[in-house]
Amino acid sequence: MKRRDFCKALALSAAALAVPRAAAENTQGAVGRAVADGRYSMRFRSELSLTDVPHDYYYSDSFFAHSALEYDHSLALASLGLVGAAFNTAASDARYWANGEAGREANLADAFATLGFADPVFYHYDIDVGQAGDFVGHSLARKTITLNGQRATIVAVILRGGGYGGEWVSNLHTGVGAGHAGFVIPVAEVLASLKSYLAAAAKQGATGTIKLWVGGYSRGAAVANLLAGRINKDLPEIDRKNVFVYTFATPVALTAASYPDYQLDYDNNHNADGTLKTTWAASNIYNILSSGDLVPRVLPAEWGYHRNGNDRFLPSTQNEKELADLDVRGASFSEVPLTISGLATKEDTDGVMERLETFFGSKQQFHDKYEAVLMDMIQCAFLRNEAECTEGYLLTDEEVEARLRGLGNMRNVDEAKLEKSVHNASALSRPLLEKLEQNDGNLTLRGKTYHVEVPLRVKQAVIPVLAVGLYYGIDSGTVVDRLTIAVSYYWQQTNGTNDCLHFNTNDQDGLSAPGIANGKPHDNGYGSFLQYGMKTNRWDTLVVERDNQMLGAPGAGDWMLNIGALAKGNSLYINGFSVTAALADGTVQSTYWGVSQTPDRTALNAAITAANEALSGTQVYAGDGRAALASALKPAVTVNRNTASEAAALDAAAASLQKLVDDLRYNTGDASGDGVVTAEDALMTLQAAAEVVELTPIQSYAADADQSGAVNAEDALLILRHATGQLADFSTKA
């Protein structure tokens, strides 16, 4: 071969090799694949059917071609499909108790593969579902594609939000800081997982522009929301426009002063005073919420808690009609129809939140009094061993004790107290469960038979859960020296009947302690608060004390409270009550229901009383005084009766109503207030001037005809002249 021909051949060979070499460089580090635009099936765990249900969602790689600062509804729906697939599968419940591979992530793994994502990693999907702790199940996967002519790697960061069992306990772990510890703590682990994943991807080859797709539901949504703030600060190389965050049913977790490193577009929807903005700045964080969903509102906004980013509310939960209209769509959603009209509305949730805020009082009070016990009780509801899952096994008392020793807040238990709590919980529960079992679920009470279906899971959990409650509370079976019952109530009685509150307590032998009715011992143990001086038609507090009482006697409650049948037109409102037990060792323990610190209603009660008195007669007030007062009285009474009304609302209602009472005036000259000016008014004024009679402030204002500030004989003369037709108008007096 001639040298020239050889060189040509070599050049052609080199050219031929260059193409595959270049292609290899172009695909280096590439993982996953592009997929065509269209609808893709993803499965999610259905708690309604206890199966894994498929649903189709539209997906396009082009979702990530625009800025994350632009809301994309189609991407939001696809995100919902992916976070739903992230739930533990229903099928994996067959290995609920098992550690290791159980297929809990199967739906998410399939969804990743369907959408072209590869190299998936899963965290915490391999542990016993009953385990609790400040962690969150999460996963990552990626795909390298071309967007807008440029190489890009989309990394999905999906947090588990359902079917996770004992992980739910962390939802109650508010901690001692201002932020929600159970949501904040897991963020560090997820961020570390993300950093490690990105570093590994970078080592494999060119990733191009990194775009993050972050999503979560419920608990997972709260962590995803916080994670977005940390990504902005810890991964500044990833521009915000490339971080797409869509969360659903997102709980609040931050205050303005807490955890600033987790904040990004903090509470973007509200002004500093809490009012809703009419417009808000762009964000890459979108929280899709239902106005009827309780989860996003815990912790309460009234405690200062909000979310990062922009909240977008589903309109379908604003009213019942819209909910009903969606039943048609719910019927075709899956093989198990969804009755959407049964969902709660915003009004329903508002009522629940008011009661919760009243009960817990404050975040600090929740943490101090309720957090530990609720966390342990919830974990007991989720813990299940193999025998419980596969054989329907019920734990023995000894096994319940062993389980309780392993709970997060009970590792250093008082053994004697624990044993007693389990014993009492067992004594209260097992006879009833056995009776229901023997009678095929039929229970006869007071001559009536009821059919009670008790799910197996409830049977398994009731004793451990109850035992935890007893352990943290006053020991069941304890005899207290004195039991004090304090009730804040409003008894509206218009019919004159003796309906009222009744109570029953148990004596030191566990027997129903005789009560008092009509001044005599009451054989059935019930006593009537009426006998202790219940007042009607006003807010009042009534205190009853009983000596030598037994708490939690087997087969009996600590104490019982019931309301007698209310006659038509009568109402009874309870603003809260407390039980205080003075023990023999001198210690005092209290339990509060409702409002532990009842707001002062004295001013409002006084204003309502004054208003009723002013409107009770036939007096004629100047201008629209009567109508204005009557109109203001009804909402003031409503505020007063509302057990959740706070002090500010009560004070405002009192001030407003009292001002209207104070502003009431009789017409000038009408000292008697009967609507006409007569010689009798002149005489009354003259007698007042001579200090023979004393006028009320309203009467004095009317009698002061010349508006001099004092009632005197000149006023009496003016009134007489007006009464006899000599003076047409007091403003023209001469």
Image (cartoon, helix red, strand yellow):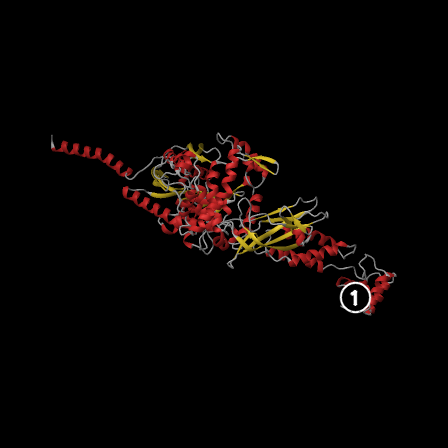
Q: Nearer the viewer, residue 552 or 295?
A: 552
Quarter holding the N terminus is top left
Where residue 670 sits in the image (x, y, percent)? 81, 60
User: For the residue marked with disc 1, what is the amino acid?
Assistant: Glu
Q: Left of 144 or right of it: where is 487? A: right
Q: Secondary structure at mark 1?
A: loop
Q: Nearer the viewer, residue 141 or 356?
A: 356
Where residue 82 sits in the image (x, y, percent)? 42, 38
Which residue occupies 47% across, 36% down?
456
Where residue 475 sits in the image (x, y, percent)? 50, 51
* For residue 194, above or below residue 361: above
* For residue 419, above or below residue 724: above
Name the residue beneath numbered marker 1.
694
Which residue occupies 86% across, 64% down?
721
Furthest residue to the bottom?
A: 690
* For residue 479, above or below residue 116: below
Residue 509 showing in the rendered view: yes
Quarter holding the C terminus is bottom right
Q: Nearer the viewer, residue 420 or 76?
A: 420
